[in-house]
Amino acid sequence: MSLGQALAVATKHPWWQWAVPVVVAWSLLGAHRQRADYRFLATTAPGFRGWLAWEYALLTLPITGVLLAGLAYGAAGLLLVLAPLVAWAPPAGEDRASRHRWRSPFRSEAFEWVSGMRATKGLLVWPLLVGLAVWQRASPLAPVAALLVWLLVVLACYGTAEPVAMLAVAARSPTQFLRRRLQLGLGYAAATAAPFWGLLASGPAGWGGTLAVAVAWLALVALFIFTKYAFYPHETHFRLTQGLILGVALLLLGHPLYPVLLLVAAVGLPWQSRRRLREIVGDG
Amino acid sequence: MRLYKSPEYPVITAMLEVLDLHKAYGRHEVLRGVNLAVRPGTIHALVGANGAGKTTLINCLYGLETGFTGTVGVAGAGARVREITGLVLYEPYFYPRLTGREYVEFCLQARRRPVPDLRAWNQLLDLPLDQYADEYSAGMKKKLALLAVLVQDFAYLILDEPFNGLDLEANLLLKEILKRLRDRGTGLLLTSHILSTLTEVADEASVLVGGQVQRHYLAAEFGTLEADLLAALHGEKLTQLRTLL
């Protein structure tokens, strides 16, 4: 279901319509707190919050319109009040800079996991997913759905390019560097996916089906890693390609071309990632 | 001069060497036949205006640039530059949501080195190691990048503007650290815009002008360095200044 459809359905529901302004304002708050131009605005235009309030009100105007069209006047009014108020929230950095951080359970060398699990709140999501999958274990789809959600969390860990100095520290050679990234990434991916595989194996899929799912799941993680370095350091490029790979993998049987595309990616990306790393850090 | 000796590496008697280095971006030639040597137990200052090619030279030496001609490497030893050399970049960037401690651990673990207790070094540098490194101030970022190379006992260090962003206290401490590293046999290549600091700690200096080493100075010749630099960089402006003042 698309976001537009979800919005249309929620607007007509007597209770869900009130969730719309709250969810929209919450998303806006998240984006506002991460604004990169906050300091610039604060120093160059001291009255910037008023302008931001107008900006946010205008941004949410289409959603307000949908709510009004659905006769959800109260929810529309609430959104009109909440959206401009977001402009007065402090930026995320202000209260983060001096905060003491807990030790990550992951090895610091696997910086993608250390950082990614913090960004995605993965260490809270994981036990929740395991709990839900165990609770719904009667349904054979529960562990598969949990694996898919967990794959998205793992994918998010490989969406940021590290500074080239970190690459230079770790890369004795492109092949050695990629091998180590794969060892760490696949190791942690397998360790965290193991409970879901266990649940899958105890269901109708059996050990054979579980093995096939596990291999395909890990192969996708490996492709995400290769994609990152094939397009390093261009984050937009590698995030888009990672998204395409995931989309093609999920719709594999939807078109005869998709398996061919995935095969081309599986052959081309490891080669291109080594080539790209050689361009950046040489042969060591 | 004592020679570098570490339990992990043999005695390094060789030197970091750059021979006839040329590097161009498109048609713009940034380095034009640069020759340079960094010896163990010496501090070699690389001096030059912005755009003279200092950072490009450092990147070529450390293997962060490809597509150059000439030779860079460790003369007389089989080791690669990156294996025995620590690098502190002009503007250190850190991966998001990684604490200072985790960054240092990453640097050590990536090189298969044991992670030592960081408390002793951090008593000197006074960093909040359990806070996110990308949220440090500029000076703290520089100190963290220094900490990551100082704990690794490298044979050589390449430091691009190490004094940049440091406060007076850290500045004085860093000078002392560099001198002590030199005395125990580490070879250092450093750049700085603060000429007085460079001449205070360096044993030799190479002046880079327009992508070429204009002159190599030994410590005894540093007296004329400032005047020579003024003449090389601002010859015409000096004439104009004399007419004005």
Image (cartoon, rainbow, N blue to C red):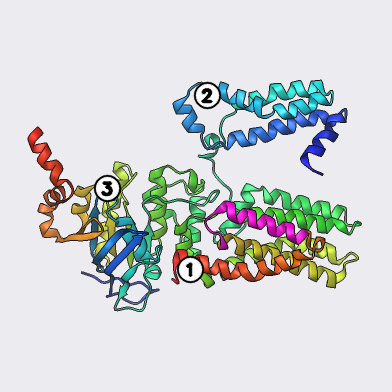
Residue labelled with disc 3: B172
Residue B13, given in percent of the width and then of the height, sits at 27, 75
Task: Name the quadrant containing residue B157.
Answer: bottom left
Give the magenta range.
A230-250
The chain containing the residue under callout 1 comes to A
Three-letter code, disc 2? Phe
The residue indicated by pointer 1 is A278
Q: Residues within 10 Å of mark 2 (few under 14, many from 20)?
A: some
Q: Which residue is mark 2?
A: A48
Q: Does A265 appear in magenta?
A: no
Residue A248 placed where, x, y %? 74, 60
Three-letter amino acid code at disc 1? Answer: Arg
Real-space CA distance between mark 2 and mark 1, rounded to the nearest whole angstrom: 46 Å
Q: Is residue A243 left or right of residue B148?
A: right
For the residue pair A266 and A169, the one nearer the viewer reads as A266
Magenta highlight on residue A235: yes
Left-right relation of B36 to A38 = left
